[in-house]
Image: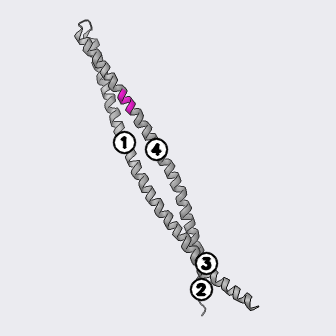
């Protein structure tokens, strides 16, 4: 009974080609993820800057409204309705400020989470690149030293006999 030998030539090449796919697939995926994370970080930074300016503006607006209210209360010429209106505006601006602060905290947390995610992506990227490179080198070296080199030696020996 004749048992066929395993086609190791194809196995080694499959090993090497798998490594190539892992290596270049990782490069492509990491470039895409890097672009996506960078874009999201830029958006979060922009939102945080806008909210910071809004908070600054609202704070100065509250100060201005408080001064107007204090001046209106000191002078007896301003009606109670106008003072109440100023108090309502101050409360509304304070509420907007509180909401902006909450959004600002959210954006800060989101930025920190994205940075942690980016670090994990880098770790996985380097691990997959190393695995892909190992597969490439192992596959091609095994193919060369186990198959191609003996064939070359055999052909060289046959050529020297003739």
Disc 2 packing (10 Å; few <14; some 14–19; many ≥20): few
- Magenta segment: 52-56
Circle 4 or circle 3, nearest the eye: 3
Q: Residues within 10 Å of mark 3 (few under 14, many from 20)?
A: some
Label whose residue precedes the other's in the sequence (3 or 1): 1
Q: Residue at x 37, y 26 (%)?
A: 57
Q: Looking at the image, is mark 2 or mark 1 nearer the viewer?
A: 1
**Which disc is residue 40 wearing?**
4
Q: Which residue is mark 2?
A: 5
Instruction: Look at the picture and state if 68 lies above or below 91.
Output: above
Characterize the local packing of mark 1: few (<14), some (14-19) or many (20 or more) Cα atoms within 10 angstroms. Answer: some
Rendered view: 159 above or below 126: below
On the image, numbered disc 1 is attached to which residue? Answer: 108
Q: Could you tell me residue 130's position as x and y percent?
A: 49, 66
On screen, residue 12 versus residue 151, left or right, reads: left
- For mark 3, what is the residue? 144
Q: Quadrant of the C terminus?
A: bottom right
Q: Secondary structure at mark 1?
A: helix
Q: Is residue 54 above or below residue 110?
A: above
């Amino acid at each position: 009974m004749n048992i066929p030998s395993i086609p190791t030539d194809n196995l080694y090449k499959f090993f090497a080609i798998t490594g190539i796919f892992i290596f270049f697939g990782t490069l492509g995926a990491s470039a895409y993820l890097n672009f996506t994370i960078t874009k999201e970080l830029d958006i979060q930074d922009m939102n945080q800057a806008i909210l910071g300016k809004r908070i600054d503006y609202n704070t100065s607006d509250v100060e201005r409204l408080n001064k107007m209210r204090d001046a209106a209360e000191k002078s007896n010429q301003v009606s109670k309705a106008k003072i109440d209106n100023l108090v309502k505006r101050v409360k509304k601006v304070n509420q907007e400020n509180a909401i902006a602060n909450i959004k600002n905290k959210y954006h800060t947390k989101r930025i920190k989470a994205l940075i942690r995610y980016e670090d994990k992506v880098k770790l996985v990227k380097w691990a997959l690149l190393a695995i892909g490179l190992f597969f490439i080198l192992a596959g091609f070296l095994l193919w060369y030293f186990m198959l191609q080199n003996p064939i070359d030696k055999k052909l060289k020996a046959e050529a020297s006999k003739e």
